[in-house]
Each structure stands twice: as C-alpha cells, then as structure tokens.
Image: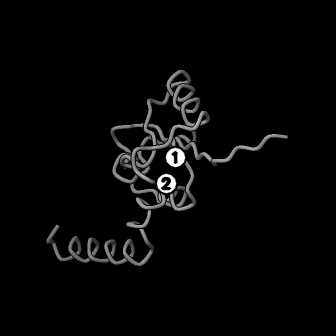
Amino acid sequence: MRFLRQAICIYSSHRIQRTREGFDLTYAEAMAADCTVIAADHPDSAADEVIGEAGFLTEATVTDVTAVLRRALTGERPAVDPETHARQFDWDRVATDALEAYTAAANGEW
C-alpha cells in the first residue's frame, strides 16, 4: 500500500454552515503539524490572514477545490513553509493579543 508523504488539511466554513469563521486556530494548528492547508477564500473569513502564503486559498466550488487538491497531492508546496509561518501563532501570544484587544474594547479605546 502506498501512503501519502504529506498530510493535507482541507477546511471550509461553508461545509459546517458558517460564512464567517473569524480567527480560527485550526489553520495554525494544521500548519504547525506541517500539513498543507487548503481553505475556502471567503470575504468574511480570516483564512487569508491566518494562512497567508503558507497554504492554498480557493473558491469554495468543487472545480476549484479539486484543482488545488490535485496540486497539493502531486507535491506542490505553499510558497512559505507552513511550520515556520505557524510559529507566530503560539498560544501565549494569541492569549496576550486577545486580552489586549478585549481590554482596549472595554476601555473604549478600540
């Protein structure tokens, strides 16, 4: 039996009936595990902010997802190393940034 050398994470907020995911750590966690991330490019999603050039964004259509999946399965890698990119999203930093944002919002400084 032949196994894939590279794990692939495909994520679409549309699949679970949401159009806005916000900042989803699922992307960062997958990249930290050196998975090639494929996500739906939606104007109300933060996927592009989290993934950047360390994964593949595509329209949420069968044709487009199939094309990107084929590229990933034949060995194409993102322009930026996923593991390296994911390091900027460590839990301590995310928690600190979230606390600062909530504090600023609560103080009317947003």
Residue position for label 1: 37
Identify the image quadrant of the N terminus. Answer: top right
Q: Position of residue 83 (x, y in %)?
A: 48, 60
Disc number at residue 27?
2
Q: Is residue 20 left or right of residue 102?
A: right
Residue at (52% x, 41% y) in the render? 12
| Residue 87, x across and y down, in percent | 42, 67
* Secondary structure type for disc 1: strand
Q: Residue at x 63, y 47 (%)?
A: 6
Q: Residues within 10 Å of mark 1 (few under 14, many from 20)?
A: many
Q: Quadrant of the C terminus?
A: bottom left
Q: How is the image coloured?
A: one colour
The tally of labels here is 2
**Figure check: 96 above or below 21:** below
State the separation of the CA atoms marked 2 and 1. Answer: 7 Å
> Residue drawn at (43%, 38%), measured in percent from left and top?
57
Q: Residue furthest top?
A: 63
Q: Position of residue 105 (x, y in %)?
A: 22, 70
Q: Would residue 98 appear left or right of 105 to someone viewing this image? A: right
Q: Amino acid at mark 1?
A: Val
The residue nearer to you, when weighing 32 against 47, is 32
Q: Secondary structure at mark 2?
A: helix
* Earlier-in-chain disc, 2 versus 1: 2
Residue at the left extreme of this rendering: 109
Evaluate if marks 2 and 1 touch, with contact meaning CB atoms under 8 Å apart.
yes
Residue 74, percent across and down?
60, 33
